[in-house]
Amino acid sequence: MSRFTAAVVVLLVAALASPSLQRRMVNSGTTDQITEHTQTIGNLLRNLPSIFSKTASWIRGLGDIGDEIHPEVGNAIRQGADAVEEASQHVPENLHTQVDEHVNKVVNVTKILQSHVNQTLQKLPEVREKVAGLPGDDIIMDVLDTFSTSDADLLMQEAIDHIEPVADAISGSQNSG
């Protein structure tokens, strides 16, 4: 995976999977708007080479203006345009698919984590039995009381339910995972 793809994945997942964003979406009723914006991100990723190329052309035009100041200024600006054009030729054509695949990997890892956390939390009654009667068991029991299988499962399921449609929207798919 390229650094560029990794950076895009990390930013999208971090931004779109945050519980505070999920709460704002649910509270404000903007789920459709978020999906629409995410589809726009998918389109942007698909069109990135063209956007870079057009930007390079625009920057080259600025090079002509720079020539009026001094030829070295124009040359420096055109070198920047060449770098942008070079970048346009190295953006993978399937970047949106790569991002989608990596977001889906996050979903799969979250599902695995959800399963492991649930299995671990289901063992709490056994731990309680072993701790009962030990010095300081009241403190340990208080700590164990703070863990809730249903809360942990619910939070992870909400993240999964939110991220899966995001991946579908980025890839252009309308299927839910």
Image (cartoon, rainbow, N blue to C red):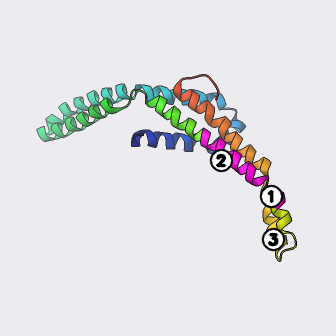
Residue 138: percent from the left, percent from the top? Answer: 85, 71
Q: Are marks 2 and 1 in contact (CB under 8 Å)?
A: no
Give the residue pinned by disc 1.
124
Within 10 angstroms of label 2, few (less than 14), some, or many (20 or more) residues?
some
Q: Quadrant of the C terminus?
A: top right
Main SS of residues in magenta: helix
**In front: mark 2 or mark 3?**
2
Per the model, the C-alpha gap separating discs 2 and 3 is: 27 Å
Residue 17: in sight, yes or no?
no
Along the polypeptide, which appears first: circle 2 or circle 3? 2
Question: Does residue 159 lie above or below 57 as drawn?
Answer: below
Farthest bottom residue in view: 135
Q: Are marks 3 and 1 in contact (CB under 8 Å)?
A: no
Q: Is residue 1 magenta?
A: no
Residue 165: percent from left, percent from top = 62, 30
Question: Which residue is drawn at the image coordinates 65% and 44% (left, top)?
Answer: 112
Dividing the picture into quadrants, the one containing residue 129 is bottom right
Earlier-in-chain disc, 3 versus 1: 1
Amino acid type of the residue tagged 3 in the rendering: Ile
Q: Is residue 52 left or right of residue 15?
A: left
Question: Around disc 1, counting alpha carbons within 10 Å, would you say few (fewer than 14), some (14 to 19), or many (20 or more)?
Answer: some
Instruction: Report which residue position mark 3 lands on.
Output: 139
Q: Amino acid at mark 1?
A: Leu
| Secondary structure of residue under mark 3 | helix
State which quadrant residue 126 falls in: bottom right
| Residue with the mark numbered 2 | 113
Q: Nearer the viewer, residue 39 or 103?
A: 103
